[in-house]
Every structure is written in structure tokens, then in C-alpha cells.
Image (cartoon, rainbow, N blue to C red):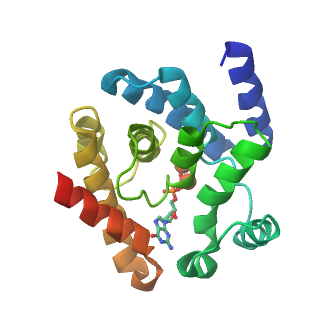
């Protein structure tokens, strides 16, 4: 991807996303690039995946539900109860059909960026972690610790991020936890 294509995509996203989400998106793009440097992954691919990860975030829960239905995307039980979860799945669909990305690794990194999944690829882990640690995030639990660990042991960062997110959801709404997040946490605790 040359700089012209990267700027074009940035321009497109700036029009769709609110200001806070737009700056978060840039943060995830740069942070994904930095993690790719650290772990020896394709930097350009990482910055593209990071840039597009929340491209469907402007839609409401209802819109996401309807758009997924209309386009034949499978909706799990928890996603039908909490359709905002669908911004990842529909984001992957949009990345392919509206932003012209056909790289399956990038599409999966977008698709699983909220819950993670067992056996994530390096790019999936990069985007998952970058989403939590990017510079415009300020108030997440254990943020500075997870930022440091992300550049030392990415699997450990995945575990900590999931623990923080699941703990938060347990307090707020235990029935709303996506079983895939729980499965991902058990998987990484086992392999780590
Ligand atoms: O889209 P972002 O805000 O950058 O981050 P994200 O894709 O991780 O989404 C975070 C939101 O999703 C946050 O409001 C919490 C929610 N979330 C994350 N995991 C789960 C979840 N919501 C439900 N219901 N269940 C989950 O397991
Ligand atoms: Fe997201
Ligand atoms: Fe995000």
C-alpha cells in the first residue's frame, strides 16, 4: 500500500467516524505497525488492519443487526442479544466490500478484534492488543502495565487484556459476556 492509498483510506474513514473514533483508529494503525516491527510482521499489512478494524463502528446496534442479516452474515446468540458486538464481523465485511481488502489475514484480524479467538494469527493478536493500548486510550485497567508487556510477550498481553475486559463485563453485565472471549482466555492461559 503506498502513501496515497493510505491517505485515501484515512480520508474515507474521517468522513464516516466521529472524531474520537477517528483518532482511536489512527492510534490502532500506528500501534499495530509498531507491534509488527517488534514481532517481525509485515508493517504495512499491520497498519492497514489497524486502520480498518473499527470501520463499521459508526452504525447503531440495530443497523449492524439489519446489515448483517441483509448480507447473510451468521449472527450468534450473544451477538443477537448485544448487536454492537457485530461491528467487528460487519467491519470485516465492509473492509472487503467497501474498502477493497481481500487479504484473509487482515479480514480475520478485523473480524476477531473484539473477542479474540483461540489460536489467533500474529496479526490478529497485534490488532487485538493495539486496540487496547493505543495512545488515545487513557482510562483502561492496567493500561501502562499492559502497554509494556505488549512489547515483551504478546500472548501475556492478550491474556491480561481479556482478563480486564471480562472482569469489567462481569461487574457490569455478566450475561453479556461473549463465550468466545472466555474460550480465548482459557486457550491462552493453557498455551502460555
Ligand atoms: O470498538 P472499540 O471500542 O475500540 O473496542 P472493542 O472492539 O473491544 O469493543 C469494546 C466494546 O465491546 C466495549 O463496549 C465492551 C464491548 N465488549 C467487549 N467484549 C464483549 C463486549 N460486549 C459484550 N456484550 N460482550 C463481550 O464479550
Ligand atoms: Fe472495535
Ligand atoms: Fe477499536
- Residue 177 in the image: above or below residue 17: below
The residue under the point 43% across, 76% down is 177
Residue depicted at x 27% and y 61%: 187
Q: Is residue 24 visible?
A: no
- Res 72 → quadrant: bottom right
Image point (43%, 81%), residue name:
173
Query: Where in the figure is residue 150, as x and y percent of width and height?
Result: 29, 38
Q: Residue 65 vs residue 140: left or right?
A: right
Looking at this view, is 36 or 133 the one in front?
A: 36
Classify 130 as above or below 9: below
Residue 21 makes an appearance in the image: yes
Q: Considering depth in this image, is 35 or 26 the residue closer to the camera? A: 35
Q: Is residue 34 left or right of residue 188?
A: right
* Left or right of 156 in this view: 130: right
Q: Position of residue 45 (x, y in %)?
A: 54, 27
Residue 102, how many percent across, how many down? 68, 37
Q: How many marks?
A: 0
Q: Quadrant of the N terminus?
A: top right
Out of 13 and 53, give the one closest to the viewer: 53
Q: Is residue 133 left or right of residue 192?
A: right
- Residue occupying the far bottom of the picture: 175
> Residue 167, image x and y in percent?
31, 70
Question: Ligand 2 falls in which quarter?
Answer: bottom right
Q: Is residue 159 above or below residue 71?
A: above
Amino acid at each position: 500500500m503506498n502513501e496515497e492509498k493510505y491517505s485515501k483510506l484515512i480520508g474515507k474513514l474521517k468522513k464516516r467516524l466521529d472524531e474520537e473514533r477517528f483518532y482511536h483508529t489512527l492510534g490502532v494503525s500506528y500501534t499495530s505497525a509498531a507491534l509488527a516491527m517488534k514481532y517481525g510482521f509485515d508493517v504495512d499489512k499491520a497498519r492497514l488492519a489497524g486502520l480498518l478494524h473499527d470501520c463499521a463502528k459508526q452504525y447503531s446496534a440495530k443497523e449492524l443487526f439489519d446489515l448483517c442479516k441483509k448480507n447473510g452474515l451468521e449472527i450468534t446468540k450473544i451477538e443477537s442479544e448485544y448487536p454492537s458486538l457485530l461491528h467487528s464481523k460487519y467491519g470485516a465485511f465492509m473492509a472487503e466490500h467497501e474498502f477493497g481488502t481481500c487479504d484473509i489475514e487482515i479480514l480475520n484480524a478485523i473480524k476477531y478484534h473484539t473477542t479474540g479467538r483461540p489460536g489467533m494469527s500474529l496479526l490478529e493478536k497485534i490488532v487485538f492488543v493495539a486496540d487496547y493500548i493505543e495512545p488515545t486510550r487513557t482510562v483502561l485497567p492496567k493500561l501502562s502495565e499492559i502497554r509494556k508487556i505488549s512489547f515483551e510477550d504478546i500472548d501475556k498481553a492478550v491474556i491480561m487484556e481479556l482478563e480486564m475486559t471480562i472482569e469489567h463485563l462481569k461487574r457490569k453485565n455478566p450475561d453479556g459476556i461473549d463465550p468466545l472471549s472466555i474460550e480465548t482466555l482459557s486457550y491462552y492461559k493453557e498455551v502460555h
